[in-house]
Each structure stands twice: as structure tokens, then as C-alpha cells.
Amino acid sequence: MQSGLPTLACVNAGNDLVDLIRSEEVGQVCDNHQVDGLVILAEKLLAQLCTDSTISDRCKSLFEREFSVK
């Protein structure tokens, strides 16, 4: 995210990152550990990259706001 790259995450159910990634629209996240579901989300992310010109800016902004050491 620091470099403006979106996230494709596979996390445990109930992880706070699920809501964060979805609400901030900075990538795709899977919380059921299904390989087929992760493949679908990867394809969805690729499509999103082609149509969403502001995703990189949102990634950088979220990083600065939530994860920066500042």
C-alpha cells in the first residue's frame, strides 16, 4: 500500500482487515481460505485495476493514515 499497490489478502475470518480493505476499496480480501474464491477475487482485482484510476491514491492514503510510523 505504501507504494500505491492494492491488496489481495487471505486472512482469518473476523480479521479487522476484511472490513478495512473493503470499506476503503484498496483491494480484495478472502476470509474463507477457498482457493477458488481467491482466484475469483484476483480476477476481480485485475479488472478493478483497469477501471479504477484512483485505487493507487487510496492505497497510499490509507497507508499514511493507518500504518505509517509517523
Image (cartoon, rainbow, N blue to C red):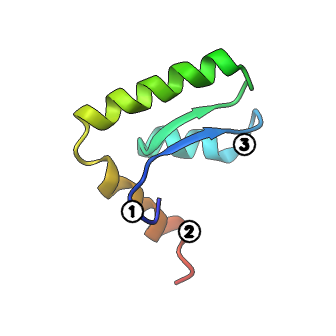
Q: Label 1 amino acid?
A: Lys
> Does residue 36 lie above or below 55 as drawn?
above
Asked if the residue at tag 1 contacts the one at tag 3, i.e. Cβ–Cβ closer than 8 Å, the answer is no
Q: What number is the disc on residue 67?
A: 2
Q: Image check: 21 left or right of 16?
A: left
User: Where does label 3 land, which residue?
Assistant: 15
Q: Earlier in the sequence, mark 2 or mark 3?
A: 3
Q: Which residue is drawn at 32% across and 37% down?
A: 49
Which is more N-terminal, label 1 or label 3?
3
Give residue 3's quadrant in the image: bottom left
Q: In which quarter of the image is residue 35?
A: top right
Q: Which residue is drawn at 72% across and 42% down?
A: 15
Q: What element carries label 2?
A: helix
| Residue located 38% across and 63% down the image | 61
Residue furthest bottom in the image? 70
Is 4 situated left or right of 67 in this image? left
Q: In this view, does 30 lie to the left or right of 13?
A: left
